[in-house]
Image: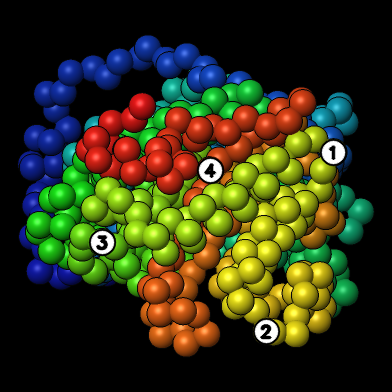
Amino acid sequence: MSEKQHQAEHRNRPTGEAFMAFMREGWAPRSTELPELTEAARYAAARRETLSAAFPGERLVVPAGGLKIRSNDTDYVFRPHSAFAHLTGLGADREPDAVLVLEPAADGEGHEAHLYFVPLADRDSEEFFADSRSGEFWVGSRPTLASAAAELGMPTRHLAELPDALAKDVGPSGLAVRVVRDADREVAQQVDEVRAQAGLGEQAQVEASTEADLELARTLSTMRMVKDDWEVAQMQEAVDATATAFDAVVEHLPEAVRRGRGERWVEGVFGLHARHAGNGVGYDSICAAGDHATTLHWIRNTGDVQEGQLLLLDAGVETDALYTADVTRTVPVSGTFTEPQRRVYEAVLEAQEAGLAAVRPGNRFKDVHAAAIEVIARHLLDWGLLPQDVTLEQTLDAQEGQFHRRWMVHGTSHHLGIDVHDCAQALREDYVEGELREGMVLTVEPGLYFKADDLLVPEELRGIGVRIEDDVVVTADGSRNLSAMLPRTADEVEAWVRSGGRRG
């Protein structure tokens, strides 16, 4: 549930009965027209059926999570838990403290979904005008029980009814209940208390319940590996908006150079487009110029952008439904790669091409990294950077080698979707060792990072960091690069920068 805010005593709010009565009267009637069932909700219903089949006869509890305090009495913008968004179709900042409960059907066939949340308050309530966290005067209108039910295609109930719903029929010979524990600590605690009160408080039973909850979380994470048609369309929408934002960044490179602290300027330009086109950025943007590009997760973005440097931009727009792109381009700020910069760039591009070619049904997820990293290792060997007595085969050995990982320490790929690193709780056998299937969306993102203080590389390469990243959907006969509209070859990238962000 939402974190508790400190309420300052000096806040002066009228409490007289005359004022209260005055605030209640004189409002036009609210519309009783109900929204249509959303397309997102239609697809979410099918996902709930899949989950239902995995846990027959059990109560499943999936909280949205609550508001988190940023400072004193201000909150971070709310984002629902990814499993909740996936199973309801609610995105953006919808319904803090809501809880989805999948209740075993009375006839024993499947589950019935119920959404518990705090609906819009009546205008004769103090919440209407006095509650700065949920009151209509402060945060705008919210759904009623009826409007949410129509929008989502499921019964809705007031959050106050949740405790009784969680406790009903739970026990050693009754219903088992599972909860997504990391979504909402207080809801998880409520479920634990229900279990204890129902006689399931012995240590062995607690451990079994904890493992049951973990199994639910893993199942929900693994379910997201294969995207349905609507999700793939969301991913393309996110990538399209990201490409437009990348164009704007390239257009603004001269201004980023001129103003100083140009990484922040780049971040701001991208963020403007992300917030306008979607819900915002899907993760903190990496806007790394010069040696900052050799820090994999450089999100401080405090540096200058200077002529002659490379700018590495790793960023993605998140749609209102919370699906995010994750794209990286590395561009020469001046519009021309130096010879060492081009050499590194083309090595990374060759590695990416190898990784992209490995994305096809029947291959393993790990094959993508294996294909890309072999190219990286070969170039490092050819450049004389690996220990003198090490062969390509030896450095690629997972146990005794891996010397090349000094300059590319990360993996080449990850699943992408509602989370930028989607499906993260899936088991290794389903993720790294898993077979690629139609509908999976992956990144392919090799890189090379030569830090300015790395004395094992030639001076001309120090301070050069390059990553090239695209978002790819597995198709029936191969793959489709969702971000193929953005320039990738060195010549294309140079032309893109020189043209001020105009493609082709």
The span from disc 4 to disc 1 (Cα, nearest Å) is 21 Å
* Residue 325 appears left or right of 8: right
Horizontal relation, residue 153 to residue 120: left or right:
right
Mark 4 vs 1, N-terminal side: 1
Q: Which residue is mark 2?
A: 387
Name the one closer to the observer, 452 or 170. Answer: 452
**N-terminal label among 2 and 1:** 1
Could you say which quadrant of the image residue 111 lies in?
top right
Label 4 crowd bin: few (<14), some (14–19), many (20+), radius 10 Å: many
Image position, residue 337 (x, y; %): 35, 54
Mark 3 and mark 1: Cα distance apart in space: 43 Å
Residue 442: numbered disc:
none
Above or below, comparing residue 11 to residue 402 in the picture: above
- Identified at 8% across, 42% down, the residue is 19
Q: Nearer the viewer, mark 3 or mark 4?
A: 3
Residues marked 3 and 1 touching at CB (< 8 Å): no
Question: Which numbered dot is residue 362?
Answer: 1
- Is residue 315 something one can see in this rendering? yes
Which mark sits nearer the N-terminus, 3 or 4?
Answer: 3
